[in-house]
Amino acid sequence: SFKVRVCLENSYTKRDVLSTIAKLFDPIGLMAPVIAKAKIFLQRLWRIKMAWNGSLP
């Protein structure tokens, strides 16, 4: 089964985004579009030079 936990109370960091992406396991590729969008989001954070522990915009 697939579960997504969304917590709106915490502020997320670039470190949290990378950690979440690394936890995703998709052996048959069903979540490939979601994982690709997450990686593109992380790439955008790199381009704007976000700090690892800075809150996301």
Image (spheres, grey):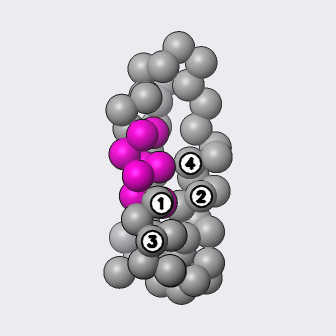
Q: Are marks 4 and 3 in contact (CB under 8 Å)?
A: no
Tell me residue 34's x, y (percent): 38, 38
Q: Are marks 1 and 3 in contact (CB under 8 Å)?
A: no
Residue 53 in view, yes or no: yes
Q: Nearer the viewer, residue 46 or 33?
A: 46
What label does residue 47 carry, if any? 3
Say which quarter of the image contains residue 25.
top right
Q: Is residue 41 magenta?
A: yes
Q: Under tag 2, what secondary structure?
A: helix
Say few, some or many: other residues with alpha carbon within 10 Å of mark 2 (under 14 / 14 to 19 / 20 or more).
some
Q: Are marks 2 and 4 in contact (CB under 8 Å)?
A: yes
Tell me residue 38's x, y (percent): 43, 49
Residue annotated with mark 2: 18
Tell me residue 8's x, y (percent): 37, 70
Q: Residue type at mark 3?
A: Arg
Q: Which residues are magenta?
A: 35-42
